[in-house]
Image (cartoon, helix red, strand yellow):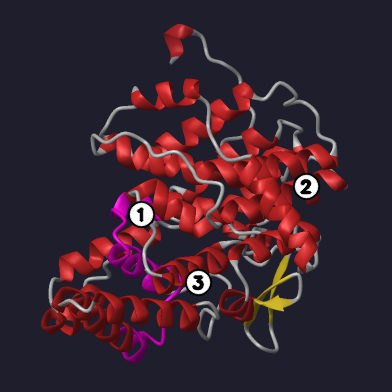
Amino acid sequence: MTDTQIKYGLAGVVTDDTAVSKVMPESNSLTYRGYAVQDLATQCRFEETAYLIWNGELPTNDQLDAFIAKERSQRGISKDLLEVMRKFPKGAHPMATLRTAVSFLGLEDTEIEDHATDNLYDRSVSLYAKIPEIVAADFRLRNGKEPIAPRDDLGFSENFFHMCFGEVPAPEIVKCFDISMTLYAEHSFNASTFTARVIASSLSGVYSAVTGAIGSLKGPLHGGANEAVMHMLKEVGTAENAKAWMLDALATKKKIMGFGHRVYRSGDSRVPTMTDAYQKMVDIIGTDEAKMYWDMSRILDETMVAEKGIYPNLDFPAGPAYYLMGFEIPMFTPIFVMSRITGWTAHIMEQLGDNKLIRPLSNYTGPAQRDVPPMGDR
């Protein structure tokens, strides 16, 4: 095997079939089961998108009602898990606490070794229902507040705001959040999804696969980028500083988060929809600080495109949009998990539907086989 045969980072390597999502080359649009994500985000609730990702078709009214009832019946985490969460170090990153909490859910599952498709679907819905409560409870506990129980009369996004803040904001804010959930839900064989499929291929179980995916998503080069974007905006400080900051960052080859994508070359198809949601959040909040972040974002975007021809990805508008919704920066990636659990579990089910252990080869670059020398000759 020669170096020229190696695809570092598996760039360009096709490893399996999938029917879940695809970026259509003719439109440069991400699609879920054939539907453009921007259309789903603006025309459907996230619950409809979740159903689509798992079932292959958009639901009828009756199917949606049954699905919503199923999800709401799975809300609520155990007192044992809450007690464990109370003991988490307050300085731990929320992605680390979420990873541990999901692993604990696996401990509570008495049929964890059952890989039947129906049971995988039930576990997927259960994770989809419980992860928002874990994220919200951890947020409140680390801020010295008691967790708020979920309500079964609220939609997915409304219920998350309720569990975080004890109230549901204006419908326009809920819709902006709901849009982000759809946009983040799935993206083919990205790093965390591939991690989930690798783990699932060993028949380790859905909780192991999801826990591994959370670990992958935690990295700043993947899901953690939305947090890094907000930290970047705070470092830039003002709109007046934005262009000079970007030019200096480019000149010194500083890592700039929220730009570029392995798949897209002419812009992330999700960005215009999320940018519209971000702008709506700025208009709703209406403060000078909100307008400053918007102006800063536009200048950074325009400067990067003009200088390098590199476009923003979804994390660039999502980070500040979440910040304006009132969420703490370390929560941004756990919120991503609340959405991507749909895509991860769809891929886990797809992997196990026709499973082959994923085990690639490597190109060895170490020394040739040699003898162990006697101690005195080392």
At which x and y percent is residue 359? Answer: 74, 41
CA gap, disc 3 and disc 2: 26 Å
Q: Which mark is residue 135?
A: none
CA gap, disc 1 and disc 3: 36 Å
| Amino acid bearing label 2 | Met
| Amino acid bearing label 1 | Glu
**Residue 29 as seen in the image, left or right of residue 84:** right
Q: Nearer the viewer, mark 2 or mark 1?
A: 1
Which residue does the numbered mark 2 point to in the structure image?
349
CA gap, disc 2 and disc 1: 35 Å
Q: Residues within 10 Å of mark 2 (few under 14, many from 20)?
A: many
Which residue does the numbered mark 3 point to in the structure image?
261
First to last magenta residue range: 304-333
Does 102 appear above or below 182? above
What secondary structure is found at the residue carrying circle 3? loop
What secondary structure is found at the residue carrying circle 1? loop
> Which residue occupies 66% across, 67% down?
12
Q: Quadrant of residue 298?
A: bottom left
Q: Nearer the viewer, mark 1 or mark 3?
A: 1
* Residues at circles 2 and 1 in contact by the CB criterion of under 8 Å: no
Q: Residues within 10 Å of mark 3 (few under 14, many from 20)?
A: some
Q: Can the viewer see residue 364?
A: no
> Which residue occupies 68% across, 50% down?
69
Does 155 appear above or below 272? above
**Residue 63 as seen in the image, left or right of residue 323:** right
At which x and y percent is residue 210? Answer: 60, 41
Does 2 appear above or below 302? above
